[in-house]
Image (cartoon, helix red, strand yellow):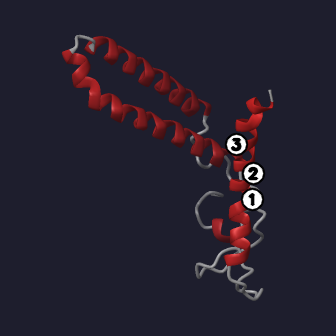
């Protein structure tokens, strides 16, 4: 009876070890630096940070990123299909496989058209009446 749970206990211990192990190793092997002002900056790329790091981003940036990922995955599915398509033609299933891929692309095209008509791909949706700072000379407020 208890032997049935040995695999579960081993895998649970292994999962906990794989989670905690790298944290412990990192704690002992990481260099200890002073907490100077340069090291506490948001990023060390030579660019001086401007403003707070807690800036609220508009949700349309995430929508555009998600649409990009969806179509990136579509291309990821098209490559293996294109590689084996000649084999399906040779086996007599070329039309079926082509119809399936056309349906797949049609569904994604309908989704893209929906996002486009909805206006989620418009990068600038509103005009800023009193723009200031680095965005004031982009012609957005004119």
Q: Residue at x 33, y 16 (%)?
A: 97
Relative to residue 65, is residue 27 depicted above or below?
below
Relative to residue 111, is residue 40 depicted above or below?
below
Q: Residue at x 35, y 14 (%)?
A: 99
Left or right: residue 79 versus residue 72 is left
The reply to whether residue 128 is visible in this rendering is: no
- What residue is disc 1 on? 20
- What residue is disc 3 on? 11
Q: Residue at x 67, y 77 (%)?
A: 29
Q: Residue at x 46, y 26 (%)?
A: 109
Report which quarter residue 91 is drawn in.
Answer: top left
Task: Decide which of 32, 76 is in the foreground and name it.
Answer: 32
Task: Decide which of 88, 63 is in the foreground and name it.
Answer: 88
Task: Decide which of 34, 109 is in the foreground and name it.
Answer: 34
Residue 73 numbered mark, or none: none
How far apart are the alpha carbons under marks 2 and 3? 9 Å
Look at discs 2 and 3 and give the one toward the viewer.
3
**Few, some or many residues within 10 Å of mark 1 (<14, 14–19, 20+):** few
Residue 58 at x, y = what percent? 71, 50
Residue 16 at x, y = what percent? 75, 51
Residue 129 at x, y = what percent? 73, 57
Relative to residue 12, is residue 139 depicted above or below?
below
Task: Decide which of 116, 22 is in the foreground and name it.
Answer: 22
Report which quarter residue 48 is drawn in.
Answer: bottom right
Residue 45 at x, y = what percent? 58, 78
**Few, some or many residues within 10 Å of mark 3 (<14, 14–19, 20+):** few
Q: For numbered disc 1, what is the local secondary structure? A: helix
């Amino acid at each position: 009876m208890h032997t049935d749970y040995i695999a579960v206990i081993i895998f649970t211990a292994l999962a906990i070890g794989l989670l905690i192990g790298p944290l412990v190793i990192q704690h002992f092997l990481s260099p200890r630096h002073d907490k100077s002002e340069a090291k506490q900056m948001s990023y060390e790329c030579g660019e001086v940070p401007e403003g707070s790091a807690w800036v609220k981003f508009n949700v349309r940036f995430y929508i555009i990123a998600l649409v990009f990922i969806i179509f990136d995955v579509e291309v990821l599915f098209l490559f293996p299909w294109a590689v084996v398509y000649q084999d399906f033609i040779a086996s007599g299933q070329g039309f079926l496989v082509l119809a399936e891929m056309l349906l797949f692309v049609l569904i994604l095209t309908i989704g893209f058209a929906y996002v486009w008509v909805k206006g989620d791909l418009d990068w600038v949706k509103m005009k800023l009446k009193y723009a200031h700072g680095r965005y004031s000379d982009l012609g957005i407020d004119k």
